[in-house]
Image: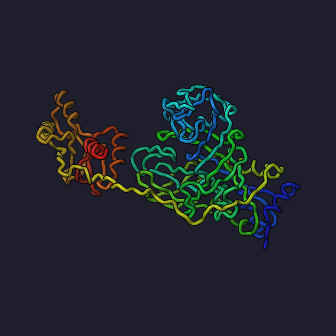
Amino acid sequence: MVKKTIHEINGRIKDGSVNVVTAEEMVHIVDELGADGAAKEVDVVTTGTFGAMCSSGVWLNFGHSEPPIKMQKIFLNDVEAYTGVAAVDAFIGATQLSESLEMEYGGAHVIEDLIRGKSVHLHATSHGTDCYPRKVLDTNLTLEDMNQAVMMNPRNAYQKYNAATNSTKNTLYTYMGTLLPSLGNVTYSGAGVLSPLSNDPDYTTIGTGTRIFLGGAQGYIVGEGTQHSSGGGFGTLMVQGDLKQMSSDYIRAANFTGYGTSLYVGMGVPIPVLNEQIAQATAVSDAGVTTNVLDYGIPSRDRPALRQVTYEELRSGSVEIDGNDVPTSSLSSFKKSRAIAKELKNWISKGDFFVSMPVEKVPKGISAKPMKQTEGIALVSDIMAVSVVTIGKDASVYDAARTIMDTAFNHLPVINGDNTLAGIVTAWDISKAVSKNKFDLVEDIMTRKVITANSDENVAVIARRMDQNSVSAMPVIDKNKQVIGIITSDDISKLYGRRS
């Protein structure tokens, strides 16, 4: 039985006799020597991950101006930062968007600009007080002009991520990247074999005070991250480090089309091999890390899992779903993750980095709770018109015009003989047909590709779908594609008007 202490390992780091390997290398060592032999041979295993970590940001202290100001609203390069603390402290979040450039620029870009030595424009306003009389401040600052710049990321380094795909007929733009229609691709994130938390799933050496690699500098784990859900294998970490010591090689801003900005963060956690149990845990391979492929076409917290996959399958370039090979792509950089694990290995080997045990371990076996909602969720069935007026596809344009005049419905679902949906025709379609002296069949002027709703869908989701597709009404259909109602933008506006 092997037993080592942190003190012993740090002694070896100091005298240069320490044996450090990456988590990728440890897989082969354990395979060759077994867990006991590997524990005797290896002192530290290094991990690494480099991916989009939206829950990231930086605390900044600007120093006092003359005359002083108590900043109540602050913008850095037109990106708002949070100022609800002391007079000249602010927190800029990675996903906060620019007031003028919107999704093209955000807090993540401000953070990267600062690391790169660029000057950023600070605009601050205040009501003014006796001790802080100034009301407006404009100045340009670099990172070196600030007293402190502390990266404090509430949720980083997910143990693993769900993979994403899309079963709908429309392209979806998400924090998991662009998802092609009809299960056209699968995206995933995380470093698999190099993932910090997958190499110490019991958090034996990971917790408050653990020294880590963060953004190219030494940082620390503060504790469990927000939404920490270790019971299901989705643990997270809250981390901090000095932004002034970080490198743009490992902190990069990113734009996700249709979603917004995020920050790519490079992180590595060293795992001291204290015994054979830890040695065995650090031998996890891509084949040993599993996750689910979720259908992001279902806009719900409880998206269905289409299948379970391993990171080995995901990294192969394709996975099988319903008998089809679906291409996969990673939102993380395995190349960067590997570089982080190697650089951390080099720091330790040279005696520039010492390992530490946490003063408190990250908790095991807990689950993140969903939001408690005290008001009912409005469903399509709550507000849709059930006495919907339809028209047959073989009716004439004249018949459709008369129906609209008689019923005051501006949208007529067009049905087949079995009452299934064939299309939709609007008052505008009829007006165009009449202007062209076209009085043929409804089938000739109807829209065939109809955006529809289901009765059990959330109204907020339907409102988003209407906006995305620039429509003002949607037929509601059942599982047999028969029309059972219609919902309009007016129905939704009235609902939200009653609640405001």
- Given residues 327 and 44, the one toward you in this image is 44
Q: Report which quarter residue 309 is drawn in.
A: bottom right
Residue lying at the far bottom of the rendered structure: 1
- Where 118 sits versus 89, above or below? above
Q: Quadrant of the N terminus?
A: bottom right
Which is nearer the eye, 318 or 174? 174
Rendering coords of residue 393 (x, y %): 19, 44
Q: Residue 339 location in percent, x, y?
A: 71, 47
Q: Is residue 462 left or right of residue 151?
A: left
Residue at 71% x, 61% y: name it: 27
Q: Is residue 7 left or right of residue 293?
A: right
Give x and y (percent) for residue 161: 55, 55
Q: Position of residue 407 (x, y in %)?
A: 13, 42
Quarter occupied by the C terminus? top left
Q: In the figure, 146 relative to 305: above or below?
A: above
Can I make out residue 181 in this image?
Answer: yes
Q: In the figure, 74 relative to 417: above or below?
A: above
Seen in the image, is 289 located left or right of residue 326? right
Would you say residue 193 is visible in this rendering?
A: no
